[in-house]
Amino acid sequence: MPNMSLKKNPMPEQEPAIRAANFKEVALGYTREIAMAEADRCLGCKHAPCVTGCPVNVPIPSFIAKIKEGDFQAAYEIIRTQNGLPAICGRVCPQETQCESKCVRGIKGEPVGIGRLERFAADWAMNEGQVSAETAPKNGKRAAVVGSGPAGLTCAADLARAGWTVTVYEALHTPGGVLMYGIPEFRLPKALVQKEIDNIRKLGVEIVTNAVVGRAMTIDELLTGLRREQVPSQASLGDSKESQSLVGASSDLNDDKYDAVFVGSGAGLPNFQKIPGESLCGVYSANEFLTRINLMKAYTFPQADTPVKVGQRVAVIGGGNVAMDAARCARRLGAEVSIVYRRSEAEMPARAEEVHHAKEEGVNFLMLTNPTAIKGDENGFVSAMTCVKMALGEPDARGRRRPVVIEGSEFELPVETVIVAIGNSPNPLIKKTTPDLPTETWGGITTDEMGRCGKLHVYAGGDAVTGAATVILAMGAGKKAAKAIIEDHQG
């Protein structure tokens, strides 16, 4: 008989007062005993509604059944047939709106903790089990992947398993994309991300860092063969121990060409409100702030080379997961932090878990509040932010109630640092250097459902197509594009 408890087994966590002062992982993970007890809540539904909510179609009842039996290795192998980054997805996927929202157990209680079980199986395999690196025989086909974020890594892994020779080109000095620069250590440890990337490398995927496609080479040059004069010198790349040299990795490819190119370059161009004062010292985009904190480990300064200045009082503009991440990072650096969001908490796009954790850690929430200007002192540093109070009016085109200003409600919020977390757009570099690549007016690449771009042999997916979204949706796009590439190049 299954365990008919109406509640999930709680996730062990650091205490709020302790974790608010460190960057160690908040959620500690299930033990084997807790995992097996949670797995026993699964009814093993034959029609598997949970799978329909998973963007990468993980066979959820099958892997949970193996956890019930204590066969954790088999559980991991089942997950990995569809998901190349399970330890990451188990931590950052919004399961509550995806697989778990379809769980039958959620009708009269809490759904099965699918994400927590996925994380458990992946962590167990990394620490105690084995990670397979089997691939089909090489088929002579070559693919270039632009960007090593979740879309690019997923596409690369699926192509490599199918026998393709795959090279990933990453603009930064460390692969991982948003997984490395955007998600804080306390939610997603960077050593774990590197383990997942190493597992993909074991499939034969080559990752070339410090390679800005659109500068070092264009999409057309990848399709037709690299020109030697366009490969940057070794001196321009630096000598990062983690990085592979673009020269060293590409010198034997100059006369070759790729059969297909997948663009998974993400949406790394930050949006701003365009209000007065955004150029003052002390105003960050969330991208810059989180990159300094996460990828460059500014929280360890002066041990790390990169500092980050955070005043005593910080305002974070926005209500999504990125805003929560920035606020919680600033809190850990000792600041008094306020989230400033123009709608109510019910409209916040951030995961409920992240909002809950932020509140536990002492982050303030100023709802129905909109900044109108940022003020500076005589030296050009932020000193305050002018805001107005809002009320919710009629629904907009997406069905969300539109915020409207309450007349006479203006007030000043004393702050020394402002972090703007209101979304990102795709970098226009690839668009500018690939004139015949179809794009939307807002900058996203135009594709069909399978990631085909309308430019022969070019595919795209993830945030470069949709704008900023979730890790798992980007992975789903990478899988679809890999399938399309394989189908289009058969024979």
Image (cartoon, rainbow, N blue to C red):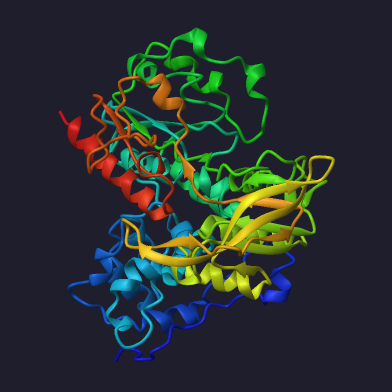
Q: Is residue 90 above or below residue 182?
A: below
Residue 129 in view = no
Query: Which quadrant of the figure contains the N terminus?
Result: bottom left
Q: Residue furthest top?
A: 229
Image point (33%, 19%), residue name: 223
Where residue 415 sits: x, y (%)? Answer: 75, 56
Provide residue 362's location: percent of width, then percent of height: 68, 72
Question: In which quadrant of the rendered view does residue 24 lie?
Answer: bottom right
Q: Position of residue 482 (x, y in %)?
A: 28, 40
Residue drawn where x is 38% and y is 20% of the image: 222
Name the residue nearer the viewer: 100 or 339. Answer: 339
User: How many labels, in total?
Assistant: 0
Q: Is residue 390 visible?
A: yes
Task: Report the quarter where the C terminus lies.
Answer: top left
| Left or right, 377 with reference to 184 | right
Question: Is 160 on the left-hand or right-hand side of 48?
Answer: right
Q: Position of residue 43 (x, y in %)?
A: 27, 82
**Furthest-front residue in this view:** 408
Residue 97 relative to residue 162: left or right: right
Residue 175 vertical position relative to residue 104 in the rendered view, above or below? above
Residue shown at 50% from the left, 59% from the top: 320
The quadrant in which residue 76 appears is bottom left
Near-viewer residue (459 or 465) = 465
Q: Nearer the viewer, residue 216 or 66?
A: 216
Furthest residue in direction left, as rendered? 491
